Image: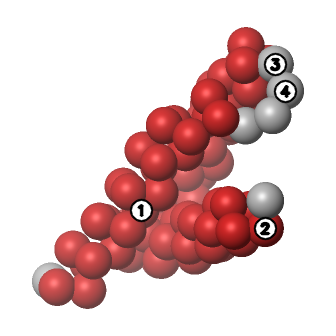
């Protein structure tokens, strides 16, 4: 249960951190928000397909891997600028 809670916590922090940091990305803020919304819609559809194919446990692990990669990418971007 502790591992699942840790996975959920890190996934939630990365998701909300991206929504918070989107206004600081270079470029047009409207275009950044539009791309963010399009990627969220695609993620919802892809997530539903992954859950129906692999089940919730494997889908959660796949989602955690994707989110961890995104979180590390945000950290690398932040510390490289």
Q: Name the spot of residue 71 as percent of width and height, x first.
A: 58, 66
Q: Nearer the viewer, residue 43 or 51?
A: 43
Q: Is residue 52 visible?
A: no
Residue at 47% x, 48% y: name it.
17
Determine which quarter of the picture holds residue 56: bottom left
Q: Residues within 10 Å of mark 4 (few under 14, many from 20)?
A: few
* Secondary structure under the numbered disc 3 in the rendered image: loop
Would you say 50 lies left or right of 38 here?
left
Image quarter in which the C terminus is found: bottom right
Q: Residues within 10 Å of mark 2 (few under 14, many from 20)?
A: few
Q: Is disc 4 placed on a helix, strand or loop?
A: loop
Mark 1 sits on what residue?
11
Reading the image, the residue beneath label 2 is: 80
Q: State the CA–CA distance, disc 4 to disc 2.
A: 18 Å
Residue topped by disc 4: 27
Query: Marks 4 and 2: which is nearer the front?
Result: 2
Residue 61 falls left or right of residue 31: left
- Specify which label sits upstream in the sequence, 4 or 2: 4
Instruction: Say what secondary structure mark 2 lies in.
Output: helix
User: What is the residue that sits farthest to the right in this orientation?
Assistant: 27
Above or below for 45 versus 54:
above
Q: Position of residue 20 (x, y in %)?
A: 48, 37
| Residue under the image location 36 percent in, 55 percent down | 12
> Residue at left 38%, top 68%?
10
Say which of 78 and 34 sits in front.
78
Say which residue label 3 marks: 28
């Amino acid at each position: 249960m502790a591992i699942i809670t840790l996975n959920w916590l890190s996934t939630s922090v990365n998701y909300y951190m991206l929504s918070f940091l989107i206004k600081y990305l270079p470029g047009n803020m409207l275009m950044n928000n539009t791309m963010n919304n399009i990627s969220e819609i695609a993620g919802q559809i892809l997530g539903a397909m992954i859950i129906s194919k692999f089940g919730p446990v494997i889908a959660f692990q796949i989602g955690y891997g994707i989110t961890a990669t995104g979180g590390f990418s945000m950290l690398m971007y932040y510390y490289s600028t």
